[in-house]
Structures are given as structure tokens and as C-alpha cells.
Amino acid sequence: MCRFLYLMADREVPESSGDGAYPGLAIVREEAFGQDSVRARMLRYRSCGFLYVVNPVGLCGCYLWHETPAEARRIREETESPDAGVGLRRRCVAAVSSLARYLEDHFDAGLALYSAWEGEAGRREPLRREVPPSYFDAPGFAPLPEDLLLSIVARAEFAASRGWDRDEARTHEWVFTND
């Protein structure tokens, strides 16, 4: 089963094929509008005019994460092949970094990012939190928890008020403790 990441937008935003300004990041518009479509189910929890699927190019949403450089070095040292996973890690880092830039560039579209397992989107009330685009720009980024709806909000003041250190990995533990 795969994790799906959905970008909800109040207005249309450009798709991304993973090149140009957003290397490694694929953003494709979700076209299904049936009664039981993902969009129809998700509208119960947040209005949106447009819905997009977000993932690293050629991979599912399960791969929209990466370990810190120190963790990556440790993993390489513990494996028989020093180049193990290097290419995949680069792709994942590029996708997460591009997502941060994309959210910043299209902030005015009223964006939210929703994480759910395949086929489960919109079936349960999501946990709602707010983050700035810069939340995605970190040296390490853990996979997003399921049924999480992150509204993208103004960046500088919000990040400072939550005490996030730009140089620390995002583990998302605060999601379950911070109201």
C-alpha cells in the first residue's frame, strides 16, 4: 500500500513534471470528480477548487522524505556498498526541497497538503495543523503521518513561534502534541 500526498488549492496552480524550477517533484492534477472520488471525500474536511497528487518523480508519496546527511553517511558505512541508496536519496532530497519552494511560490493559492494511505483519503477526520512552506526545507524530513492535513501559512513568524530550528530534521512529533 502506498502513501498518497494531495495538494489542495483554492485556485489552479501549475503542475510540475520534475524539471525546471522544481527538480524531482511531480505535481499532477487529480481529475476524478465522482461522488466517491478522493476530492469529493476530502471536501468534507476542507474546501478546495483544485486537487493535485504530489510525489517525487517516478516514485509514490512514500518516498517524499529523506534522512539527515549524517544518517545517510551512517547507513552507507554500515552497508556493503558505499553508494547504496545515494541516487534515491538525492531524488528524495530534491523532491522535498522543491516542495518547499513550490509552496512558497504558490502560497497565495490557499494551499494545504494532505497525507493518507492509498484509498483512504477523506475517509476519516484528519488531524489539522498549520505550517509555513519553510517547514519542508530541513536537513532531514520524516514521512508525513497518515490523515494529516497541513494548511500552509505565513512563514517567518510562525516558524519562530513554534521553535523549529531550520537546521534540525523534521520528525513531525509535534503534530500529536501541539494544539
Image (cartoon, rainbow, N blue to C red):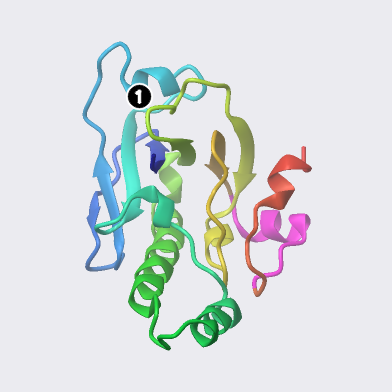
- Where 66 sits versus 74, above or below? above
User: On the rendered structure, is 141 left or right of 28?
Assistant: right
Quadrant location of the N terminus? Answer: top left
> In the rendered structure, does residue 161 fall within the stretch colored magenta?
yes
The furthest residue to the top:
35
> In the rendered structure, does residue 148 fall within the stretch colored magenta?
no
- Residue at 58 percent of width and 82 percent of height: 74
In depth, the one of 135 and 170 nearer the eye is 170
- In the image, residue 72 lies at what x, y percent? 52, 78
- In the image, residue 37 lies at what x, y percent? 31, 20
Disc 1 marks a residue whose amino acid type is Arg
The furthest residue to the front:
80
- Where 165 sits versus 161, above or below? below
- Total marks drawn? 1
- In the image, residue 32 lies at what x, y percent? 23, 24
- Residue at 43 percent of width and 70 percent of height: 93
- Residue at 40 percent of width and 86 percent of height: 81
Residue annotated with mark 1: 39
| Secondary structure beneath label 1 | helix
Q: Callout 1 environment at 10 Å: few (<14), some (14 to 19), or many (20+)? A: many
Res. 146 image quadrant = top right
Q: Which residues are magenta?
A: 154-166
- In the image, residue 10 lies at what x, y percent? 39, 33
Res. 157 image quadrant = bottom right
- Where 75 sits versus 66, above or below? below
Res. 38 image quadrant = top left
